[in-house]
Image: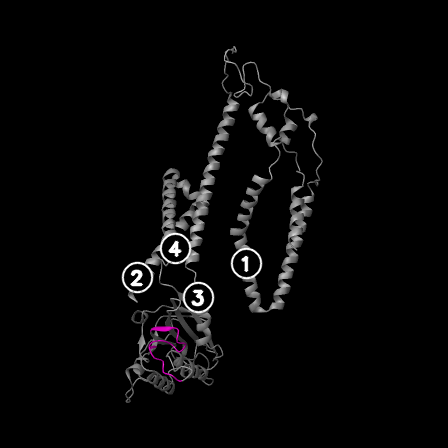
Amino acid sequence: FALIPSLLLVQLFRRLQPRKKRISPLHQTLYKIRPDLNINEEKIKKKFSLSFPWWCIFVAYGLCTILVGLSIIFIIARGIEFGDDKTQKWLISILSGFFSSIIFTQPLKIIGLAIFFAFFCQNSSDDKEANEYLDNNQLALDNDEEHLHSVKKKSIFTYRQPIRVDRLNETEINHARNERLKEIHMWSMIKELLLYLCFITVLYIIIYSNRDLNSFLQVNHSRKFFFNSRITTIDDYWNWLENSFIENIRAQQWYNNDPPRNLSGFINDKSNRLIGWATMRQLRIKSTLCRVQNEITSTCQYDYTFNNEDKYSYKPGWKNETIQNYSSAISQSFQYSTSEDLNTYSYIGEYGTYSGNGYVYEFRGRLVDLQSNLSLLHQLEWINNQTRAIIIQLTLYNPNVQLFTSVTFLAEFLSSTGIFTSARFEPMNFYTFTSITQFVSIIIYMIIIIYFMWIEIRSVFKLKWTYFHQFWAYIEIGIIICSWTSVGIYIWRYNETRRV
């Protein structure tokens, strides 16, 4: 439906007459070469072609505005019918299609159509515009001129008068110089275009080679296997921990009650292996006096910030002293640890940003011991009204598809007594250079980046401070910086993989 209106608008813009009469490019070129050449425009006969007056440009732009407005109204109306989730997905697909069309699809169409018309839709050998302006008698040779190549075969005995070659006048020299400069500039632009096409092609190959089709399936399976979004209270969270999560991080019996032989370290889906152990980290706030009257309440519970984070260590039950002995795992879960001790980072949630510190419980040991410890933590009220975030982190490895998956479950305990749960699954492939194509592409990419650096350094020495007044210079510098940053990230990732 959009093709026919688009073609009509294109034809309307193409057939608009100029507001001021323009001189033909061929006429200008002939005047530069032969200023004494007289062109009799009275003899010019032009073919009839449909055209519109110049003021129709306002009509064309008005039609464009109407079409854009109708499209926006249609998108808004359909978006209201779809609902929030479908609307977001639809808008994302529209925007991704729009930008991919501008950056990739449309340039390829233009190049392809240009090549097609250049080779298969050429005009006849007679140049219509040249025939309109040129007269064969005006281009006849003077007495001191002759054709460089003659069709007729001349005899060696034919007498040939000496020819005096006239030098080019100043106008002809300037014209030839300008044409040569234009030609040099054209070839430099073609070389630069081909280089950037090669650069983009190699970049696409590298990006696509790091893309794994199994990533979506791995994330979808892990989300359905672990995550529960219907948690609204602290009791719901404990129920999920004790009855669902704890049983899923250890391989249980098969469907026919056979024991899970040779599956030590695997989770209950029998496909993913747990790397190390899972950790549960709690972030709490201090219990502060309330700013309102004491008749209402004596203490207030605020939302989490870095300033009101509780950083004290306690005995089990959040007490300063206790006479009862507990296991090291239980006692450690009430001790405050810093991000340097835990080697963790800050985490951004839906309602706040949480530091890498906290009180940590590690899911280490047999399933029976883990269930007993969780039950005891529940009795000791490890999660209470001062808890503001629980972050559970674990790493899975699926040997069938050679994918690592970093899993993070976040439960945000709001001051309004609500709980908001979210999960993040990040599939990763640490096995780089899995194919010779990827290895060769990275080498070519680095060669191109080094060549870009050499060009920019040469331009800096040539243009000096003028170089920094160009917009595209900053684009080139940005590409080089981002490329070397990605190399640094790759080296860091490789070292971290070796360390882990």
Q: Label for residue 215?
A: 3
The magenta stretch is 257-275
Q: Is residue 165 left or right of residue 309?
A: right
Instruction: Name the residue tied to disc 1.
Output: 95
The one nearer the camera, 439 or 491, is 439
The type of residue carrying mark 3 is Ser
Q: Nearer the viewer, residue 129 or 482?
A: 129
Q: Earlier in the sequence, mark 1 or mark 3?
A: 1
Q: Label 2: which residue?
A: 495
- Looking at marks 1 and 4 on the same chain, the residue that comes earlier in the sequence is marked by 1
Say what amino acid the circle numbered 2 marks: Asn
Of pointers 2 and 4, the one earlier in the residue sequence = 4
**Label 3 neighbour load within 10 Å: few <14, some 14-19, many 20+:** some
Q: Residue at (40%, 83%) from the top-left corner? A: 242
Element marked by disc 4:
helix
Residue 379, image x, y percentages: 37, 87
Residue 443 can be seen, yes or no: yes
Residue where numbered disc 4 is placed: 438
Inter-mark Cα distance, 1 to 3: 23 Å
Specify few, some or many for label 4: CA neighbours under 10 Å numbering under 14, 14-19, or 20 or more. some
User: Can you see residue 350?
Assistant: no
Position of residue 253 measured from the top left corner of the image (x, y, whole percent): 39, 82
